[in-house]
Image (cartoon, grey):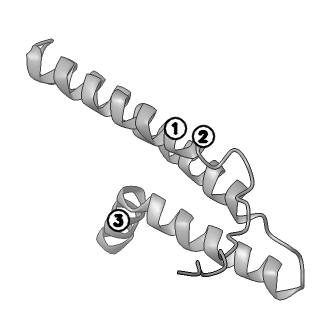
Amino acid sequence: MHVEKSFVGMVAQEWYVLAAYFGTFVLLEIRKYGERIAMHRVARHALWAASVVVVLHSIVAAAAMIRRSGLDFVVIDYALVMTLTGSLVYLLGCMFEESPQPAFTRPPRRQ
């Protein structure tokens, strides 16, 4: 019984790592069978999902801190910093909105 509780506790804490491994496995399986993958879309959605997770985690953690010690500057600062971090990750995902153009080399200049 103790081993099962510790295993569930470990999975509950590291669920995002397991989700990343599973997502990578799915992408590799799709690619193995010849499907094309738009990696800019994968990166965009991964960053957007990460931003949602960061903001939701900050809300839950701030609520737990408020219940434990009341509302003070540390809780407000933590919630604000984590929300801004989530927003920054979201905006980073917006950079992948367009498909990147291929890079072309310029011919060397003649001197």
Percent coordinates x, y for residue 77 in the rendering: 17, 22
From the viewer's perspective, tell me whether residue 74 is left or right of residue 105. left
Percent across and percent down for residue 31 are: 80, 81
Q: Is residue 56 depicted above or below 10 in this figure?
A: above
The residue identified by callout 3 is 10
From the image, tell me which residue sits under label 1.
90
Would you call the spot at circle 1 few (<14 residues within 10 Å), some (14-19), or many (20 or more)? Answer: many
Q: Are marks 2 and 1 in contact (CB under 8 Å)?
A: yes
Sequence order check, earlier mark of 1 and 3 = 3
CA neighbours of label 2 inside 10 A, class few (<14), some (14 to 19), many (20+): some
Please tell me which residue lies in front, 64 or 5.
64
Proximity of marks 2 and 3: CB atoms separated by less than 8 Å: no
| N-terminal-most mark, 2 or 3 | 3
Question: From this viewpoint, which residue is outermost toward the right?
Answer: 34
Residue 94 shows which numbered tag? 2
Please tell me which residue is depicted at 72% across the width and 73% down the height of the picture.
Answer: 27
Amino acid residing under circle 3: Met
- Marking on residue 2: none
Q: Is mark 2 on a helix, strand or loop?
A: helix
83 sits left or right of 100 in the view: left
Image quadrant holding the N terminus, namely bottom left
Q: Which residue corresponds to the image point at 39% horizontal and 62% vertical from the top-left?
A: 14
Q: Is mark 3 on a helix, strand or loop?
A: helix
Residue 26 position in % (x across, y down)? 72, 73
User: Distance between the Cα atoms at labels 1 and 3?
Assistant: 28 Å
Residue 78 position within the rendered picture, expressed as x and y whole percent measured from the top left:
21, 28
Counting other residues with Cα less than 10 Å from the Cα at mark 3, is it few (<14), some (14-19), or many (20 or more)?
Answer: few
Q: What residue type is labelled 2?
A: Cys
| 37, 7: nearer the viewer | 37
